Each structure stands twice: as structure tokens, then as C-alpha cells.
Image: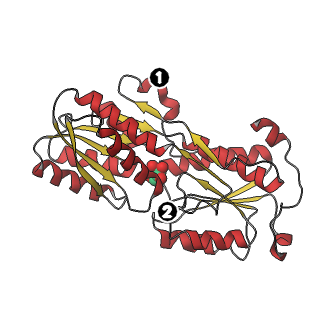
């Protein structure tokens, strides 16, 4: 169906954009706004999106805020209002604060497609493509429980920022699933502001306060990389099981070295590719899927060599 969709690409007008603005919109022009720059998850997502756009004869420009920060992302979004793209693919960095600026671009005539993160208000985007993050959190809890076995102990969850839809769902899914393992007790979800250094210091403090700490779930690559640093600093590598999310080069290296016991890898390139496909469908007036779920893969030292396709990229 995807191939047929792309083959059907035509050079027509932007669909029901509404208002006078639509007349000036270049119907082949897509914009991607990621969460932040130089980050392997978003690089891989952009690579998938660029390839799909090129295949379909569309132009894709990418804007990246210097930090994962709704204020900085809002500046990038606001800059589109005067010259809106036919579709905006965006990973909103806050599920509420990003609503008003994105809505303004929509009002200016762009189709809105959410990639990865999403707004709490589901009426803004035409389509949302992401992993099943709640399920990813559950999978992380099951993986950690398998690693720990019968031993009893405390577990730490490192989330990023309140309002990041994806990692908040991962943390909640993990906590929910952990209730099925009475030997494991969560000491609660801690926020790290998406800063590895913050994650490292939360881990150092948790190890000191909870000598029975048996596991950590880090909900994204920044939390994971920081958690590995924290465990290294207090010489607890391998003694405290670390289950990370994502598969950045640094996390993959950490898995190989035994700093992580497992990683839940997403498929960011597929999220980007499907985002572009849905954007084109919306622009061309074809049926759009409101929600698409991308696959997740649990990587361990044993299966990682057979699963290199899930490792994130530093460049396309
Ligand atoms: O985990 C990904 C992404 O899914 C999440 O929404 C934000 O963090 C990452 O980009 C990794 O840093």
C-alpha cells in the first residue's frame, strides 16, 4: 500500500488547507522539526524521512533546536508561520506547551504529523507515528525481572522531563508492569531533565541511599548514558542491572562492555519514513492513518550482533 501511495504522488495543489494562505504554499515542501540536534535517535529519524521524501519527489528541510526545550522549539515553529510548508513533521518537546505554536502553523495551512512524541490534545495532528511506549516500559520491566531472577531489591526509574509524552509513558508502563514482580520494589520515578550528568548523579545518590538497589530503568538514551556513567563512578557496573531505552552508539558500546544488560531499541528511521508517507497522503488528499505504531526490539549482549540494523546512526 505504501508503494502505491508513493507512486501516486502528483504535483497537485495542497488539499483542503483552508484560507487564502494555501495558495502560496509549495505543495512539495515538507519541514521536519526534531526534538534536538546531534542526537542519534533524531538523526536516524531524519535519515528515514529524507529517504522517503526523495523517493516521492518531495523536498524535506529539517530544523533542529539546540536543546530539547519547548522555548527553543517554539522559535523554530514560529519561524514557519509566514511561509508554511505543505506539511510539518514534528516531535513536540512538551505535550502541552507546544500545542499553541503548532496550531498556528496548522492555521496557516500546514498538515501536522507527529513523529515520536505527541501533544496531549489529539485534535491537532492528522497522524502520529511512534513506538508503543507504554509497552516498551512493560517490556523493560519484564526484561529487568528476568535479569534479576528471585533476588529481592529496589529499582530506580530515570525519566527525562515531565511533559515528554514518550518517556513519561515508558516510565508509567514500567511501574505498572513491575507490580507483577513482588520481589522488586520501585523507589520511584526520578526526572533527569534529559541531561546525562543529572542521570549520573541520581544514580550515585540512589546507590548510596538504597544498598539493595538491583536494577535501573533509563527511559531514553540520555538517561541511559548518564546512568552508565553513574554506575561506573561508584564501581557498581554489573552489580546493578541497567536496562536502557534506545540504541545510541554509546549505549550499544555499553551493552557490549556489560555496562547495560539490555536495551529496548526503537526504529526511528521507520518513524521518519512513515511520517513522510502520512504527510504526503494528507497533502494529496488520500486516506491518512491517525496512529501508527513502530516496532521495538529488546537487545542483549547475546543477540546484538544479529540485530545491528537496530543500532542508531550518527549520519545518513
Ligand atoms: O528516546 C528518544 C525519543 O523517543 C524520546 O521521545 C526523546 O528521547 C530520545 O530522543 C532519545 O534521546
Q: Counting residues from the N terminus, which is met first, the one under dot 1 or under dot 2?
A: 2
Q: Quadrant of the N terminus?
A: top right
**Is 269 situated left or right of 202 in this image?**
right
Tell which of 107 and 55 is nearer to you. Answer: 107
Pointer 2 residue Cβ closer than 8 Å to ligand 1 = no
Q: Is residue 71 above or below residue 166?
A: below
Labels 1 and 2 touching (C-beta < 8 A):
no
**Is 18 situated left or right of 134 in this image?**
right
Label 2 packing within 10 angstroms: few (<14), some (14-19), many (20+): many
Q: How is the image coloured?
A: secondary structure
Residue 184 in sight here: yes
**Residue 17 lies in what quarter of the image?**
bottom right
Find residue 229 and report its horizontal and vertical position in percent.
Answer: 25, 48
Label 1 packing within 10 angstroms: few (<14), some (14-19), many (20+): few
Find residue 84 and report its horizontal and vertical position in percent.
Answer: 73, 69
SS at mark 1 in the image: helix
Q: CA distance from mark 1 to mark 2?
A: 33 Å
Tell which of 58 and 122 is nearer to you. Answer: 122
Q: Is residue 274 above or below residue 71?
A: above
> Residue drawn 47% across and 45% down?
133
Q: Which residue is mark 2?
A: 93
Q: Which residue is mark 1?
A: 306
Q: Nearer the viewer, mark 1 or mark 2?
A: 2
> Residue drawn 54% across and 49% down?
43
SS at mark 2 in the image: loop
Residue 261 in sight here: no
Q: Quadrant of the C terminus?
A: top right
**Is 11 situated left or right of 201 in this image?**
right
> Residue drawn 16% across and 30% down?
151
Find residue 178 and report its horizontal and vertical position in percent.
Answer: 30, 39
Find residue 123 and report its horizontal and vertical position in percent.
Answer: 64, 62
Amino acid at each position: 500500500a505504501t508503494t502505491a501511495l508513493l507512486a501516486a504522488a502528483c504535483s497537485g495543489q495542497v488539499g483542503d488547507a483552508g484560507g487564502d494562505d494555501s495558495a502560496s504554499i509549495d505543495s512539495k515542501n515538507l519541514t521536519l522539526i526534531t526534538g534536538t540536534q546531534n542526537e542519534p535517535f533524531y538523526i536516524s529519524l531524519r535519515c528515514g524521512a529524507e529517504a522517503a521524501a526523495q523517493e516521492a519527489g518531495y523536498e524535506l528541510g529539517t530544523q533542529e533546536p539546540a536543546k530539547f526545550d519547548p522555548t527553543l522549539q517554539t522559535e523554530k515553529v514560529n519561524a514557519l508561520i509566514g511561509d508554511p510548508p505543505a506539511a510539518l513533521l514534528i516531535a513536540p518537546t512538551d505535550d502541552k506547551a507546544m500545542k499553541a505554536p503548532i496550531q498556528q502553523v496548522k492555521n496557516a495551512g500546514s498538515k501536522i504529523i507527529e513523529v515520536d512524541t505527541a501533544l496531549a490534545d489529539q485534535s491537532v495532528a492528522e497522524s502520529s507515528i511512534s513506538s508503543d511506549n507504554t509497552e516498551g516500559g512493560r517490556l523493560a520491566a519484564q526484561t529487568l525481572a528476568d535479569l534479576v531472577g528471585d533476588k529481592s531489591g529496589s529499582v530506580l526509574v530515570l525519566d527525562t522531563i515531565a511533559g515528554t509524552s514518550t518517556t513519561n509513558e515508558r516510565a508509567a508502563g514500567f511501574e505498572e508492569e513491575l507490580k507483577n514482580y513482588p520481589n522488586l520494589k520501585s523507589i520511584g520515578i526520578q526526572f533527569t531533565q534529559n541531561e546525562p550528568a543529572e542521570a549520573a548523579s541520581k544514580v550515585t545518590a540512589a546507590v548510596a541511599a538504597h544498598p539493595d538497589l538491583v536494577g535501573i530503568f533509563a527511559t531514553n538514551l540520555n538517561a541511559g548514558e548518564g546512568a552508565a556513567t553513574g554506575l561506573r563512578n561508584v564501581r557498581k557496573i554489573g552489580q546493578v542491572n541497567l536496562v536502557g531505552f534506545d540504541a545510541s552508539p554509546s549505549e550499544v558500546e555499553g551493552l557490549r562492555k556489560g555496562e547495560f544488560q539490555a536495551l529496548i531499541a526503537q526504529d526511528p528511521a521507520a518513524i521518519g519514513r512513515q511520517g513522510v508517507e502520512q504527510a504526503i497522503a494528507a497533502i494529496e488528499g488520500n486516506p491518512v492513518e491517525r496512529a501508527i505504531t513502530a516496532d521495538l526490539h529488546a537487545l542483549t549482549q547475546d543477540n546484538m550482533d544479529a540485530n545491528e540494523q537496530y543500532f542508531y546512526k550518527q549520519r545518513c
